[in-house]
Structure formats: C-alpha cells, structure tokens
Image: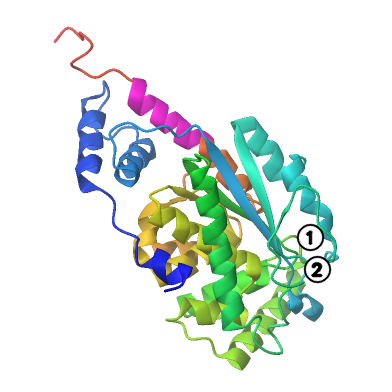
C-alpha cells in the first residue's frame, strides 16, 4: 500500500463527544446561546478534531508550494513566467504578502518547490521538484498519473513533517504564474459546469482575455477527458504540481487530526481534489476567505464550506489563511477564558 492509499484510508470523522463538550461550555458562557456565531463553530470543530476539551493553537505554519505550468504558452496570464522563481524565495524570507502576514500573526512559512521552471536551488526553499513545470494541458495531459500521485504524496510528507515538529494548525498556500487556469479546469470538471462560469482574471488578466482563457480550459478538458469521479485522473490531466501537493497537505492533516486552513481560489481547487479522494477530510478544513475569483463560490458549495472572512482578496500565496489564524486564535482564547454563568454572579 502506498502512502496516498494509507493516508486516505485513515481519515475518520470528528469526535462527537468533544464537539458536544465544547458546545456545553460555549452555551454556559456569559452571553446569549450561539451569539458568537462562527467563533463557536470553530471551537466545536477544533474540539472534535483534536479530541480534547482544551487545545493549543499557538504553533502555526503555512505550507506553500510552487510550480510552473506548460499551459502558460497559450497566453492565459499577463506576467512573465519567471516571476514564480523570482518571487518564491520571498515566501521563506518573509517579504511577500503571505510572509509578512505570517510574521504578524506569529506563524512560520514552509516554502516547497515542486515544479518551478528553473535549474538552481532557491534560497530558503525545500527542493521537492518533480520536474520543471507541467506539460501544456491544451496539448495533452499536464502530468502522468505517477506524477500526480507523487505530488499528492509530497504534500502528505511535508505536512507530516510539520506535524512531527509540533505545528497544531496548518494553512496552505501556493505560487505559480497562471495557476488559476488549471484551478478553474479542476473546478469545471468536478462542478460539471462550463469553464467560463468559473474563470476569472487571476493575477490581472485583461477582462477581454478571460474568454480566451476559458476556451483554452474548455479545449483542455475536451482533449484530455478527465474522469470527474477520479481526483488523480483530474489532477494528472488538467492540474498542477503545487495544486496536487496542497491537496496532499489536506489529506495528511486530516489523517493526523490537525486542522487545515484553506486560502483562496487555488487552494479550493486543491481541497476539491482531496474531498474527492476522501470526503471526510472536509471536516478538518477551515475556509479562510471568500476569494474574488468567480469559481470560488462553486467550489465552496460543492464542499459545503463557509469562509470566515470576506476581504475581496485574490492574492493567493496563503495570505488569507494567515489572516484567518488570528480568528482561530481569538476563538480559542475566548472559549478558554470567557467566564461561565456558574463562575460569575449576575445577580440572578
């Protein structure tokens, strides 16, 4: 049995006993029942994930993966492809969006190269390169089935390494010029909808080019004919190495009973793949924010997730997940420290 099979078979539902215990405490806090909304939902979810009435969420990390894409040659992105390797070291250095926000919230960033189109090792970046970018999905499969499994297993391996180091909350992020294109393709296949419905401007594509981008995705799906019920087939036909690795983190965290905080649009495509492999992993997901990309709503509806934040963000990188860490910490702090009616005399 390979690592992917072993992990996917060892994902179990949350512990209902501790969800109920958390609800009992939340209902006793000096407030109207249910009045803290998603703060209460997060606390009950964490109790069920950890299987404990009390838990420590202070040690946090964003695992970010980077890869390039052969479909770039179809003119689906406005920026030079070398921005991927120029920008990605800044994840580790704390200079980009997710790096800066992670510093602010006290989280670490683990940067992993799974397929950047360069020959040299990048400063501060873990080298798990499969190859220098996927193949052009508009001309054939983006990768082989073996490569699809490999990127999923890299995500599992890196997640488990972080868990062994004591991280209790893990977010996912990414970098890869034009990776909204394979993300839209994944969502289109799983959501059974036309690509135009779930395709947006990405990192700044002119609106008049969105139809072209959607047509490239449509052509890629028609050519490769991915099986909508087989996540590995979808990933291999129209996916990306970094998207598969993020899906692997979702699976790895779920099997090890660690909450995984999704970022935005691209991470939702990864979450859909993980969900297709084992639907129970949805119980371990926390959706950070409502990305401005049009395919976001479709993917969230399929997984049945409600984002914590709505910030009109579309940066990616893991930036939304980093912001959500503070909400998770605030939820836990409130749950642990707010008084109950039994502890306070309100003159009743």
Taking 61 as reference, is 64 above or below it? below
Secondary structure, mark 1, is helix
Seen at 64% across and 53% down, the residue is 64
Q: Which disc, if any, is residue 84?
A: 1
Name the side, left or right, on which 264 lies relative to 250.
right
Tell me which corner region of the image, top left, top right, bottom left or bottom right, holds residue 204: bottom right
Tell me which corner region of the image, top left, top right, bottom left or bottom right, holds residue 177: bottom right
Q: Main secondary structure of the magenta part?
A: helix
Q: Is residue 194 magenta?
A: no
Percent x, y of residue 162: 54, 47
Seen at 62% across and 92% down, the residue is 223
Mark 1–mark 2 CB contact (< 8 Å)? yes
Q: Is residue 330 magenta?
A: yes
**Which quadrant is the C terminus positioned in?**
top left
Label 1, label 2: how far apart the Cα atoms are: 8 Å
Taking 201 as reference, is 34 above or below it? above
Q: Which disc, if any, is residue 259?
A: none
**Which quadrant is the N terminus positioned in?**
bottom left
Tell me which corner region of the image, top left, top right, bottom left or bottom right, holds residue 175: bottom right
Depth order, front residue of 168/225:
168
Percent x, y of residue 212: 73, 80
Seen at 35% across and 20% down, the residue is 337
Q: Which residues are magenta?
A: 326-337
Q: Which residue is mark 2?
A: 117
First in sequence, mark 1 or 2: give its number: 1
């Amino acid at each position: 049995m390979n690592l992917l099979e072993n992990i996917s078979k060892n994902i179990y539902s949350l512990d209902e006993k501790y969800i109920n215990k958390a609800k009992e405490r939340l209902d006793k806090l000096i407030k109207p029942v249910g009045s803290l909304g998603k703060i209460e939902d997060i606390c009950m979810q964490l109790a069920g994930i950890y299987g404990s009435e009390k838990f420590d969420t202070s040690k946090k990390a964003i695992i970010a993966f980077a890869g390039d894409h052969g479909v770039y040659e179809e003119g689906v992105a406005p920026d030079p492809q070398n921005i991927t390797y120029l920008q990605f070291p800044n994840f580790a250095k704390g200079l980009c969006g997710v790096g800066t926000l992670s510093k602010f919230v006290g989280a670490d960033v683990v940067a992993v190269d799974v397929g950047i189109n360069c020959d040299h090792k990048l400063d501060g970046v873990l080298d798990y390169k499969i190859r220098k970018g996927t193949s052009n999905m508009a001309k054939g499969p983006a990768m082989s089935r073996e490569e699809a499994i490999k990127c999923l297993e890299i995500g599992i391996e890196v997640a488990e390494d972080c868990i062994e180091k004591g991280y209790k909350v893990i977010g996912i992020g990414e970098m890869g010029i034009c990776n909204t294109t394979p993300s839209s393709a994944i969502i289109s296949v799983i959501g059974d909808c036309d690509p135009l419905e779930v395709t947006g401007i990405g990192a700044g594509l002119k609106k008049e080019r969105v139809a072209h981008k959607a047509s490239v995705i449509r052509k890629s799906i028609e050519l490769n004919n991915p099986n909508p019920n087989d996540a590995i087939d979808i990933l291999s036909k129209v996916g990306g190495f970094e998207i598969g690795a993020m899906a692997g983190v979702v699976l790895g965290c779920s099997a090890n009973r660690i909450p995984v905080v999704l970022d935005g649009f691209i991470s939702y495509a990864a979450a859909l793949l993980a969900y297709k492999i084992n639907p129970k992993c949805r119980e371990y997901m926390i959706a950070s924010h409502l990305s401005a990309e049009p395919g976001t709503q479709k993917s969230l509806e399929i997984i049945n997730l409600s984002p914590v934040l709505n910030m009109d963000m579309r940066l990616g990188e893991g930036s939304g997940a980093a912001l959500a860490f503070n909400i998770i910490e605030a939820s836990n702090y409130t749950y642990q420290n707010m008084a109950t009616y039994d502890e306070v005399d309100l003159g009743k």
